[in-house]
Amino acid sequence: MGCKVLCPSVALLAYLIICQHVRAQCAPPPFASNVILTSEYLPTQSFPDGSKVTFECVIGHKPADSKASKSVTCQGNQWTSLELSCTRKLCGSLRDFLNGRYEMTGNLFGDTAKPVCDKGYMLAGQEATRTCRDQGWDGRDPLCESVKCTAPPAIENGQLDNEPLESYEYLQAVSYRCNGGLNLIGQSTLHCSEDGTFKPDPPKCFDGCPTPKIPNSKRTGGKSPPYKLGHFIEYKCDDGYTLPRKGYIVCRANGWDPEPPRCIENCRLPELSEHVTLTEEFRSRGSFTHGSNVIVGCISGYEPVDATVSKTITCEETKWTKSPLTCKALPTTPPTATTTTTAVTSTVRTTSKAPKEKALPTTPPTATTAATSKAPKEKKEDTTETSMPTWQKGILGVVGVVAAGGLLCLVYFKFIKKRSEHEKVAKKDEEEL
């Protein structure tokens, strides 16, 4: 009985103790900038309640406040606040060295210092930039030695005034001269510069400009060869050829200025696509100079497929630019329909009493005859030409046929009626006799 009550209580107490133990622990603490756990705590993944850990500054950094606490404590499942903060270590400024100095980005951990020699001196060996490390500046001061220039370059058709040396000191000068009859172009004196080369560039010994060859041209001004510095030539092209620019050139130190031109053959009449032709103002011309523009269009009875395309072509040297113009036949217009309507009127004259006649015509007259002999002269109406659709013309044709038939019938019936009257009169006369 006692065990039944005691055992569950003990089990519950043990469970609560275990749960409390599991709940009361901390994960590894987060690191602040430039701060890290000391090496003894880095492998640990969980810390029980009450645990204390220590931080330190990363390499190249030091505590901003030496009195600030470097430890934090796990309370329940959270860490207390860390007071430690770190800043970059100071390496100090580098002093100038013999015949040189440093160009520094700063004097804290990670900054650099580039050595620069004074004017007239150059670094011995490769450039060595120094860096501020955890223990201070790395490397050592470089060595700057006096600038030396190798022998100056030789020039064509000229030489140095003095015998060349194996090396020259900083700012030491050399001079050049040309062979007899040649012009020296450029600076005759050069100096050994701070980068170990002679400056400015060496001069040139000028023997004049070559005789230019320009086919299909003739010289109209200037001297004959040889051409020395400052001489000029002026050219003109033969007939049928064109100069694209001025034909005036001058002999300079670097040669002809500008480059000798060339005479370009004129363009002939262009070969155009089907149904395309030159406009009238250009057809009579036999040739066109370089750069000329002409206008093209469609021949009679044709129109452009696209009215927006350019109708201008250009003579470029001996060829024409391609024309985008294409032409198509104009649409066929149906002929204007004209209808002549003639109103025919016929008047038949009758008498109340016809004269006595012994004989009557045995053949009935035609409508034309009746209309001509009995009717007065027809009144002809003015013909009117109108343009109308085909179906209207068909209807008018039918109406005309019907009207003509009706007129013929009317004339015929008039003739029958008149004959009948004549027969009655003749019969009556016979009876009276």
Image (tube, helix red, strand yellow):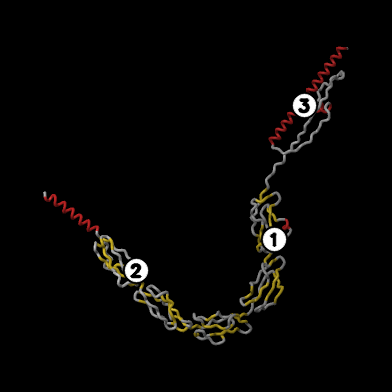
Sort mark 2 into few (<14), some (14-19) or many (20+) by Cα contacts within 10 Å. Answer: some
Q: Find residue 285 and report its horizontal and vertical position in percent.
A: 73, 60
Q: Find residue 191 and report its horizontal and vertical position in percent.
A: 53, 83
Name the residue beneath numbered marker 2.
Answer: 34
Q: Secondary structure at mark 1?
A: loop
Toward the left, the furthest residue is 1
User: In this rendering, which labeled residue sits more in front, label 2 or label 1?
Assistant: 2
Q: Find residue 365 and report its horizontal and vertical position in percent.
A: 81, 24
Do the residues under discs 3 and 1 have CB atoms within 8 angstroms?
no
**Residue drawn at point x = 11 percent, y = 49 percent:** 1
Nearest the eye: 313 or 114: 114
The CA distance from mark 3 to mark 1 is 76 Å
The residue type indicated by label 1 comes to Arg
Name the residue beneath numbered marker 1.
Answer: 268
Nearest the eye: 30 or 376: 30
The residue type indicated by label 2 comes to Asn
